């Protein structure tokens, strides 16, 4: 009986945690929806929420905006900001969508073929001549 009780207690804890994560991400009303029936953007958000289930100290997101439309990127940005602010969590974001990066990052490191071009606030990095040249090109190119 003791072993069964521990299993059931653990199951209840996991179930409660899952519901809390779904609620925080705004998915509780769709808790019975199969993942395949969610939009691509919603699936991306759910993947991030699932990453929180292990209570990480830092959240690493690799290209979370890939394949998303403008509205989905906006919603994703809101979710990432909420996670950062409500959980007081560091989020390391590897992303090519500069609008998303610049709208949520406190600190940016710009790379070009693995070489660091600039580091600083979003405004500092956006104004850096090496970043502008690498991302926009120059008249000579």
Image (cartoon, rainbow, N blue to C red):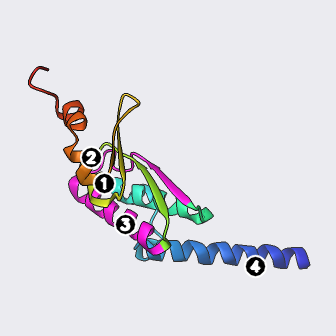
**Which residue in the protein does label 1 denote?**
121
Q: Position of residue 20 (x, y in %)?
A: 53, 77
Q: Please tell me which residue is depicted at 79% across the width and 73% down the height of the picture.
A: 7
- Specify the quadrant of the image occupied by residue 84: bottom left
Where's residue 110, x and y in %?
A: 33, 41
Q: Which residues are magenta?
A: 58-86
Q: CA distance from mark 2 to mark 1?
A: 6 Å
Rendering coords of residue 133 (x, y %): 19, 31
Q: Point out the frontmost of discs 3 and 1.
A: 1
Q: CA distance from mark 4 to mark 1?
A: 46 Å
Q: Which residue is mark 2?
A: 125
Front one among 57 and 18? 57
Q: Closer to the N terminus: mark 4 or mark 1? A: 4
Q: Point out which mark residue 81 bears.
A: 3
Pick the front one: 28 or 112? 112
Q: Residue at x 85, y 75 (%)?
A: 4
Q: Which residue is mark 4?
A: 9
Where is the C terminus found, in terms of image quarters?
top left
């Amino acid at each position: 009986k003791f072993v069964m009780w521990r299993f059931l207690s653990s199951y209840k804890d996991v179930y409660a945690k899952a519901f809390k994560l779904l609620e925080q991400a705004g998915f509780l009303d769709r808790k019975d929806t199969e993942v395949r029936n969610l939009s691509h953007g919603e699936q991306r958000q759910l993947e991030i929420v699932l990453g929180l289930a292990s209570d990480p100290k830092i959240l690493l997101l690799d290209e979370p905006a890939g394949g998303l439309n403008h509205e989905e990127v906006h919603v994703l940005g809101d979710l990432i900001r909420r996670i950062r602010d409500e959980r007081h969590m560091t989020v390391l974001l590897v992303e090519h969508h500069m609008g998303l990066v610049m709208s949520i990052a406190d600190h940016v490191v710009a790379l070009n073929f693995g070489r660091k071009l600039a580091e600083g606030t979003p405004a500092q990095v956006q104004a850096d001549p090496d970043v502008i040249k690498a991302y926009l090109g120059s008249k000579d190119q």
